[in-house]
């Protein structure tokens, strides 16, 4: 049994989220865990919307196998449904927008976003999955958006909430209905309570911040107490208010804050309540109203503090260096002063940042005499001296920038390091971002649970395989991860069944055990601690031991050592490929993102992980260009700068080989490689293939014609294998000499069979083009004998470089018709007719085919008559005719 529920005192956001969850779990039962706010009950009575909610007393809690909880993650807030957590094999799916707390439930699926309402979380899911909602559902979600964001005025409101509301309006949300339930007038009783709040209010000035505390006593529970508090706050334009209300035997706390210096959620947690930094609530037991107020005042003095500014945290004066400094000299400064980052400055302005890590790598590759400007980081953010702690946390924690220059009037006045920030947080836990959502706490997305995405995106067989991999790893106390392009494309919602697994432990041992578990075969590579497991259905899984690669010299093959998943991901080419997903059962689906990779996916940028990435492995340049064009991304500024540096340093001249050829082959295997080829030309990389290659207008036309020819061939739906990279490579080399093509093949260690194909097709096509350009009118048989020796690739290459229309039509006629024409008669037929076996057969069949191609023969009888006429046999009685 599946059940969808929410917290005890349901509001519009919780109800709308339940209805939204029902679209994802159509078999689930809807059931409130407790009561509903008065405004929501009013909506139920007046609305024409009909929803099937079951009472909790009618649900057999011990039979619940899947519990879907929305708008909270606290077991204490779901009433009796918390008993379901003890059910054997219970699955818990959580959808929420509230900040993390230590008491949060752990879900098999967790979709948590730091946005203004849980409704936004579901809207984003609907948009990603193209789920259609009706006008009533859109209206209900719009009510939730307005209620939980204070009509988009609360500090917790994000751009995602506004985008969600725009989408809901497009879906037909009725704003008149929203206004009816969100914009409310107070009743006379509520007005009298408001007056009591005003009369009892006291303003405390704590850390120079005015904070209003008020209290009232009521004989019975007041449904709209939070609405009254909000009205008071609006009337008096208060920045912070804490309202205590004694109702029956309990004390209720409602807290609101518009400023980051006062995190009301953190204070409500001290009363076992919860909420956001700007809106929170708590139910207080076993305490009088006076005791509750005294505790509140103590907590305010404990937690309220002026927000730290950059000028208070920054270090100054600054240790820096000029752009003329060599890498060796910069490294000496870094070591002498015990610092890890060195600002590179000119006339008081910062040009870049040079790190000790980049210095060490450059010196290791004998590049220490180069200026620091070659490998300094230029892609970084700066902050003014007035920047807040929230701004600093966002850069250092969210964007992983370890070193922040502080700029005033375009001049560097100080720096803040990651250590500076962490010292502040550790020494004063009140600043910890996990408790303060207004200070842009680190997103839980970096290590978020992707189980739901895996379930939605993968077929059943792949999902079971991933779970099996995790279970086999757990049994031997290994840790297994899915890594690389599989993770990247999963997050981009792109299908990718190239599965790469990294194991912390012995990858080869693990591969053998996995092969045994799935009934497959294994092929190992002991030198690199890698293996390939082939499943019975033919599917292959690449398995590697978590490893660290280092390079003895620029452009060298990597030396491999055992490592951890973090170092394994650090060795990868680009940030978008440096993510992993836990597969072990206890953490299945948890994303691992050490390098802020998701932000680069969102920004659609290709970035290297460290500044000497292209120096260590120049083949990454071709990979960067291929991914940039295929995915519609752009190179990051620093990545582009380091790419140009690597080209200028002529690293390609130091070592060639098959690894470069593989990257070139992959580029030319893309659907349309012309944009990537144009990008190679922009970076002056074509000369690396051959010094005479120039992408001028004519070569561009040839490549475009090659693309058209390949697309045309694909539309024919012929059951023929065409290696289009050969066509594009022939097109790219079409204007250089044959010996230059041979030099290319030797330089890049092209396999001999491909070398022969490239040379043969180039020579033949060059000869045929000359004939086609001289002779416009050719008989079909002439076209057949002219093109018969060309491969599929050679034919398409010919179409690409042939300028005249008649030549292209000749190739088209041959591909679609002529090459499929055959004679009715075969060798055995000629023998039966009486022709003696021998070379004569080929002459006869070729002559028959030629006449048939030109339309002179149609049937078997036609062919026999032709032979009798043109090649008469001797008399059948064995005597020569006179």
Image: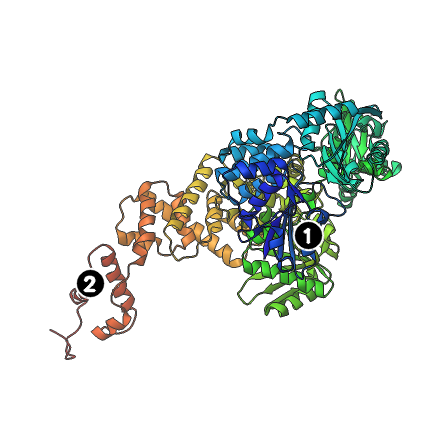
Q: For this rendering, which residue is in front, 222 or 592?
A: 222
Q: Nearer the viewer, mark 2 or mark 1?
A: 1
Residue indicated by mark 2:
859
Q: Residues within 10 Å of mark 1 (few under 14, many from 20)?
A: some
**Residue at the left extreme, as displayed:** 882
Q: Is residue 433 above or below residue 659?
A: above
| Horizontal and vertical percent position of residue 587 | 69, 55
The circle on residue 98 is: none
Mark 2, residues whose alpha carbon is within 10 Å: few (<14), some, or many (≥20)? few
Element assignment for label 1: helix
Question: Quarter of the image containing the C terminus?
Answer: bottom left
| Horizontal arrangement in the rendering, residue 592 relative to residue 268 (left or right) | left
- Quadrant in the picture for residue 473: bottom right
Picture coordinates of residue 567, whole percent (x, y): 74, 51
Residue lying farthest to the right in this orientation: 336
Question: Which residue is at the far top?
Answer: 409
Tell me the quarter of the image containing the N terminus. Answer: bottom right
The residue pinned by badge 1 equals: 80
**Residue 212: image location, x then y, percent:** 78, 26
């Amino acid at each position: 049994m599946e059940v969808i529920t929410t917290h005890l005192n349901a509001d519009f956001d919780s109800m709308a989220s339940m209805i939204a969850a029902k679209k994802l779990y159509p078999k689930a039962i809807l059931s409130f865990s407790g009561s509903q706010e008065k405004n929501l009950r009013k909506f139920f009575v007046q609305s024409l919307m009909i929803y099937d909610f079951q009472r909790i007393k009618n649900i057999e809690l011990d039979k619940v196998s899947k519990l879907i909880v929305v708008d909270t993650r606290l077991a204490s807030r779901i009433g009796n449904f918390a008993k379901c957590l003890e059910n054997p094999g219970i699955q818990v799916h959580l959808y929420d927008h509230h900040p993390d707390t230590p008491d949060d439930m752990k879900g098999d699926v967790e979709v948590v976003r730091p946005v203004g309402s849980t409704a936004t979380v579901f809207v984003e899911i609907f948009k990603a999955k193209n789920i259609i909602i009706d006008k009533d559902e859109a209206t209900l979600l719009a009510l939730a958006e307005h209620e939980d964001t204070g009509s988009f005025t609360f500090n917790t409101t994000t751009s995602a909430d506004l985008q969600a509301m725009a989408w809901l309006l497009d879906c037909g949300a009725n704003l008149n209905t929203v206004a009816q339930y969100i914009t409310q007038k107070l009743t006379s009783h509520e007005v009298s309570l408001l007056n009591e709040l005003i009369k009892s209010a006291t303003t405390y000035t704590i850390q120079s911040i005015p904070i209003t505390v008020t209290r009232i006593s009521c004989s019975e529970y007041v449904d709209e107490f939070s609405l009254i508090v909000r009205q008071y706050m609006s009337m008096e334009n208060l920045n912070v208010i804490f309202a205590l209300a004694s109702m029956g035997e309990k004390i209720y706390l409602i807290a609101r804050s518009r400023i980051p210096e006062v995190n009301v959620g953190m204070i409500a947690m001290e009363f076992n309540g919860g909420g956001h930094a700007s809106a929170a609530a708590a139910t207080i037991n076993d305490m009088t109203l006076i005791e509750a107020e005294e505790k509140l005042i103590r907590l305010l003095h404990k937690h309220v503090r002026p927000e730290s500014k950059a000028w208070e945290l920054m270090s100054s004066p600054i240790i820096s260096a000029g752009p003329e400094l060599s890498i060796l000299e910069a490294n000496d400064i870094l070591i002498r002063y015990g610092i890890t980052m060195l600002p590179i400055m000119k006339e008081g302005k910062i040009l870049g940042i040079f790190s000790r890590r980049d210095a060490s790598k450059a010196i290791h590759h004998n590049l220490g005499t180069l200026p620091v400007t070659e490998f300094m980081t230029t892609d970084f953010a700066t902050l003014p001296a007035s920047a807040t702690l929230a701004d600093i946390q966002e850069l250092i924690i969210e964007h992983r920038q370890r070193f922040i220059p502080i700029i005033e009037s375009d001049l560097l006045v100080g720096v803040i390091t990651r250590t500076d920030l962490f010292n502040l947080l550790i020494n004063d836990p009140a600043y910890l971002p996990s408790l303060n959502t207004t200070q842009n706490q680190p997103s839980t997305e970096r290590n978020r649970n992707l189980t739901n995405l895996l379930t939605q995106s993968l077929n059943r067989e792949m999902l079971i395989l991933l779970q099996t991999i995790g279970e086999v790893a757990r049994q031997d106390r290994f840790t297994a991860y899915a890594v690389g392009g599989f993770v990247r494309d999963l997050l981009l919602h792109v299908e990718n069944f190239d599965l790469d697994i990294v194991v912390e432990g012995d990858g080869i041992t693990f591969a053998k055990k996995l092969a045994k578990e799935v009934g497959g075969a294994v092929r190992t590579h002991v030198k690199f601690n890698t293996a390939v497991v082939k499943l019975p259905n033919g599917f292959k899984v690449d398995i590697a031991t978590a490893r660290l690669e280092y390079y003895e010299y620029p452009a060298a093959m990597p030396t491999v050592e055992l490592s951890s998943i973090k170092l394994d991901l650090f060795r990868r080419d680009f940030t978008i490929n440096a993510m992993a997903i836990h597969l072990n059962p206890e953490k299945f689906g948890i994303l691992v993102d050490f390098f802020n990779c998701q932000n680069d996916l969102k920004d659609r940028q290709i970035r290297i992980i460290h500044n000497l990435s292209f120096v260590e492995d120049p083949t990454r340049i071709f990979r960067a260009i291929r991914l940039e064009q295929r995915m519609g991304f752009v190179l990051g500024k620093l990545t582009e700068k380091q790419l140009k540096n690597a080209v200028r340093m002529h690293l390609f001249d130091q070592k060639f080989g098959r690894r470069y050829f593989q990257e070139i082959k992959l580029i030319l295997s893309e659907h349309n490689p012309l944009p990537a080829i144009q990008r190679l030309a922009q970076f002056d990389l074509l000369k690396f293939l051959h010094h005479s290659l120039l992408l001028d207008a004519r070569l561009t036309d040839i490549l475009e014609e090659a693309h058209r020819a390949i697309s045309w061939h694909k539309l024919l739906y012929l059951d023929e294998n065409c290696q289009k990279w050969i066509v594009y490579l022939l097109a790219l080399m079409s204007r250089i000499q044959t010996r230059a093509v041979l030099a290319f093949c030797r330089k890049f260690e092209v396999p001999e069979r491909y070398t022969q194909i490239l040379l043969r097709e180039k020579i033949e096509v060059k000869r045929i083009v000359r004939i086609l350009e001289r002779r416009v009118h050719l008989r079909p048989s002439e076209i057949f004998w002219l093109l018969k020796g060309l491969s599929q690739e050679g034919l398409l290459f010919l179409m690409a470089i042939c300028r005249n229309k008649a030549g292209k039509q000749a190739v088209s006629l041959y591909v679609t018709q002529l090459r499929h024409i055959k004679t009715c008669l075969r060798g055995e037929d000629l023998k039966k007719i009486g022709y003696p076996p021998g070379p004569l057969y080929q002459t006869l069949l070729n002559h028959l085919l030629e006449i048939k191609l030109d339309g002179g023969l149609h049937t078997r009888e036609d062919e026999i008559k032709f032979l009798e006429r043109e090649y008469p046999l001797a008399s059948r009685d064995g005597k020569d005719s006179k």
